[in-house]
Structures are given as C-alpha cells and as structure tokens.
Amino acid sequence: ATPAPRIKAGALREAGLTVWIWNRTWERALALAEEFGLKAVPLERAQEARLLVNATSVGLKDPGATPLPAEFFPKEGAVVDLVYRPLWTRLLREARERGLQVQTGLPMLAWQGALAFRIWTGLLPDPRGMEEAARQALEGE
C-alpha cells in the first residue's frame, strides 16, 4: 500500500503545485524527499513558499519551541501547523503576527476522528461539530 504522505504529495503535484521538503537535518530531508519523490531544499528556501505545513511534533511538548525560526517565514501566504495541542503554537502565533494566514491542526484531527468512526461503525459524523467541540475543550486549557 502507498503511504498517505505520498498520496497527499502526489495530489498537490497533480494540482500544479511544487512540493518541497525540509527537515531539521539535511540528511533526513534528502531521505524523505527520495522516499516520496520530492525535492529537498535548505531551510532558507522556506521564505519562497506560499504554503508552509509543519508536519512535525515540534511545539507539542514544548509550547516555546518552533520548527521554523521567524526569519525564514514566507513573505506572504499561509502556515498550517498539524500540531493541535496547544491550539495556538508558537509557529502559528508568530505567523499570524506577521500577517500570514494560519490554520491549526484541528480540522485534520476532526476529519481523522470522523473517518475512523466511519471505518468502525459505517456512520460518518459531522467533522465540523467534532472540530468545534475539540476547539472549545482546547481553548479552555
């Protein structure tokens, strides 16, 4: 079976987008790029991106940590952080302060939960309701 990240990267390429990978270590970036048929780029190239997606756990256990120093943020566009706890990671807060569009990891979490529920029950709950319930719970922390 094809791993999910390969499918997503392929869908982005089919939509006409260029997909880059960078990592905290260059060797890992090269390995991931080869594994998924993408191009590894140095961290400095993040400024050229229009959509930046953090798919690491950086910020999950240490809310003060960020996977990308602010000086490497894109000049315009959007930043998505798949970390959903804390709801507003340092990465998202700093991106929002610089006028970039931001998206938390809650939609991904809600859709994963809804699709898992469908696998087990055959029923698909409304992911928007699940997302709102999760948002309320996390905002109360």
Image: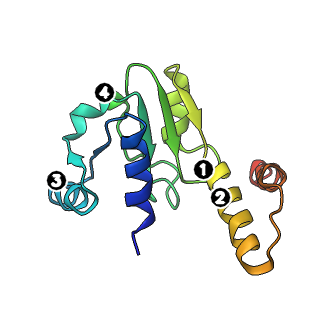
Residue 83 to residue 118: above or below: above
Residue 120 to residue 97: above or below: below
Checking the image for residue 105, the label placed there is 1
Checking the image for residue 26, the label placed there is 3
Q: Report the amino acid beneath label 2.
A: Leu
Q: Are dots 2 and 4 in contact, CB under 8 Å?
A: no
The residue under label 4 is 47
Circle 4 crowding by C-alpha within 10 Å: few under 14, some 14–19, many from 20: some
Q: Secondary structure at mark 2?
A: helix
Question: What is the distance, in whole Å, between disc 2 and disc 4 at their CAs?
Answer: 27 Å
Residue 12, visible in the rendered structure = yes
The residue under label 2 is 109
Circle 1 crowding by C-alpha within 10 Å: few under 14, some 14–19, many from 20: many
Name the image quarter holding residue 119. Answer: bottom right
Taking the image as shown, residue 81 lies to the left or right of residue 125, namely left
Residue 85, position as x, y percentages in the image: 62, 56
Checking the image for residue 119, the label placed there is none
Residue 86, position as x, y percentages in the image: 62, 52
